[in-house]
Amino acid sequence: VFPWVRAAIPPACAVLALPLAPHAATPAPCSPAGRAIVAEVFYDATGDDTGWEFVELYNPVGVPCPLEGLRLEAGDGAGPGRWTLRWTGSAGDTIPPRGRFVVGGARVDPPPGALATLDLQNGPDAVRLVWPDGAAEVVGYGPLALAEYACGDPAGDAPAGQSLARIPDDAQGGSNALDFRAASPSPGRANQPARDAGLIAGALALDPEQPGEAGDARLAGWIENRGGTGIAANAIGLSVATRGAFGTSDLLASPLGDSLAPGDTASFLLALGRLPAGKQSILVRVALAGDGAPGNDADSLLARVGAGPLEITEIQFHPAGGEGEWVEVRNRSGVPLDPARYTLADRGAARGVPAGGTGPLAAESLAVLAQDRAALLARFPALDPARIWQVSPWAALNNANDGSGLADAVVLRDDDGTRCGRVDYSAAGVPAGVPLELRDGEWLPARVAEGTPLMPPSALPALAGRFAIAPRRVRAGGAEARFSWSLPWPRGTIAIEIYDLAGRRVARPLPETTVSTRGERAWPTGDLGPGLYLAVLRARPEGGGDPLTETVALRIEGEAP
Amino acid sequence: VRLAPALIALAFAGPASLAGAQDFAAPAPPAATSSAAAFLEDGLPPARGAASFEALATSWYGLPDLATRAVALGGGWRAARAAAGFSQTGDPELGWSAAGLGLGLAGPEAGGGLRAVVRRDRLPRSGGALDGAGLEVGGAAWVRAGAGLTVQASAPQLWERGREAPLGRGCEIGATGAMDDLAFRLARVSPRGGAGAARHEAALGLAAGGLRVWLAARDQPLRGALGLAARAGPIAVAAAVESHPVLGETVRISLALGGARP
């Protein structure tokens, strides 16, 4: 039917390899015996595939394998007989014994043996080698419905950025599913070297994800023995460095204590201690003597230590006036920034992108990220529209706490995914419709019921003394009183205790807490019985100094039966 | 034989109480005798029925808006004892006024009485006659157990109606002993309603002529007090300072005319 069938002459490598044909008891191989085989297919690069795609051929026998007349075809698994030619071997194309030959695009590194625009489709699809004598090998991937596109079960679809690699390089398990699996692309190199320790890509995780400037962090990840032989304990070295505006800093070097059989994985958890402040790339590298695939030895993770340039300052998670949910943010970076280069999310994975505002946000300015920009502007017509940004998609914020004691989280990220800030909030005790605002370093119900979008929290009125309680008389049975304090220091640690007239401590509404100069705290009197009580504020300045004790009286009214 | 009345008195006192005072609290050294103010505060009638007048003031923990001023009159005829008094505590917003009445029987060896205090907020919410008003009734007894030992039991808030008292007081049981010029007092105050832990008090006094000085200690939290009393003829003055580790000092002073010599 085809000219190459009639002209077929078995290649030299086929003849010499005949004694090596598989034993009858073993599964029938998918590749014709004694010829070059498909070793790797890279069809889905991260982003644009152009120039990155390749098909690697491997000559498993001890003599050169000429490729003249060999046809490389791509199959479209959507229908029968949809094979199209992508490349044909010429007279000069030969694979040396145990060698490799790559057919691929111009961006493949190292440069391929033959340049070709493969334009391979993502699965379910296939590639096929057809030799001049009619022998053929098919490699199918993805959930194929037609048998012509795979040998046995098709291989699994490789995720973007990974290739479909034959592992081991001469595997002949009887089906594409058994012979191929996803791996880091390795054009021109063995898919499974004898020794290869690799980091599992994308598995690095920092704990906490955004450490505080004074806090320690740990790094977790996974290592896989991708080689064909076992690796002894402590043979793999791990090194971690971080790179940011501060330069590059080596953090630690440590051996992996686990021994790994081929295919085994091991997790690691490294205490990094205190990291430099700011955004940075944490680089992890594994070292193994004789590692045959250095390309999978390194991975990196973007992280931020300390607060990001955008700070969450107010959260409206249960709007009552039809304005939709909104989150107020402040540019704390000191320079203008573009809110559109950040994303907003709740505890889920979906990230909304801001749009609709105008221009960069000036330093120290506030912006509002809104679920419904138009509705928010209708509810608050005095707001500056340039600083109201519509976020799409908007992750609806929960209004009630779950079993964790929290309702939801508001998460800001840079557009590259680096976390910029996160607030986990509780809805307990927040009156309906009242947003939460960041005040004096704490998240508290806003003093203004509808919130203060694009405005700082309303200031507390001056206090006549250092400590006060209002009202001074409340009814028994859970009425609420409000403590107010005004410290003579910028920040201090305070505690509030309640004593009865006999001097016995009966309640502790506020355990030791660090607060700023001026603050308030609501206190439900709970089951405290009727009587005259003394509320005591005990305070001391941050960093040491003379403490302060202030006492005020409180009357709880109640009737005897 | 003399212990029997003491045990009876203890039994009468039930769960035991010598509670923290409020309206008619007087600076009192450890002594077997009581005053008109103590009769109103705890229900313990004085052994002698001599007429007396007392003026009292208490500064609670140094708070200017929380001070008590009180007057008390007391006397007796034969074994009958009576006392009446008026007290005011706190500023108009928080404070209250109180009128007290004590009736009882007492002699050299034993005594028992009832006390009633009616209070009304200084700033009732509605202005009605009974708004913010409350009544409490209690009782107490004492008995000399011999060898200078006197045992007391008090339940100052056996019955309450209306606005509850500013301080819930549990039952108190105590003993006072005197040996020449030395006197001591031990007391245990039960928590009201059984909630919480009991409180304990110990005091030691020394008399020299018309002067008396005493030291006292209480727990929950641990604190100490120093008192001084002096009598010249029918006039007696006393003062005591109690220091609380957190709340500060409570100062009590009294001026008495007549009454029993300690």
Image (cartoon, rainbow, N blue to C red):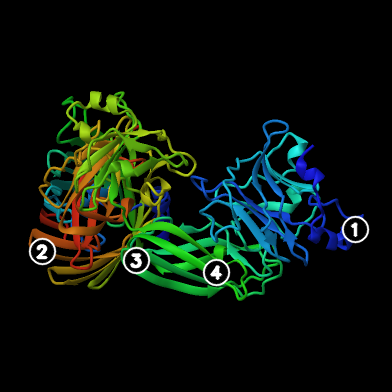
Q: Residues within 10 Å of mark 1 (few under 14, many from 20)?
A: few
Above or below for A422 versus A235? above
Name the kind of residue labelled 2 in the image.
Answer: Arg
Q: Given this view, does label 3 or label 2 mark the residue nearer the observer?
A: 3
Name the kind of residue labelled 3 in the image.
Answer: Pro
Image quadrant holding the N terminus of chain B, namely bottom left
Q: Residues within 10 Å of mark 3 (few under 14, many from 20)?
A: many
Tag shown at residue A276: 3
Do the residues bearing badges 4 and 3 touch, measured as CB atoms within 8 Å? no
Q: Nearer the viewer, residue B72 or B127?
A: B127
Query: Which quadrant holds residue A83?
Result: top right
Residue at 22% of width from left, 43% of height from top? A361
Q: Which element type, helix, strand or loop, lies under badge 4? A: strand
Q: Which residue is mark 4?
A: A286
Tag shown at residue A294: none
Do the residues bearing badges 3 and 2 touch, measured as CB atoms within 8 Å? no
Residue A280 in the image: x percent, y percent?
A: 37, 60
Above or below for A536 versus A61? above
Choose the circle earlier in sequence order: 3 or 1. Answer: 1
Choose the circle earlier in sequence order: 4 or 3. Answer: 3
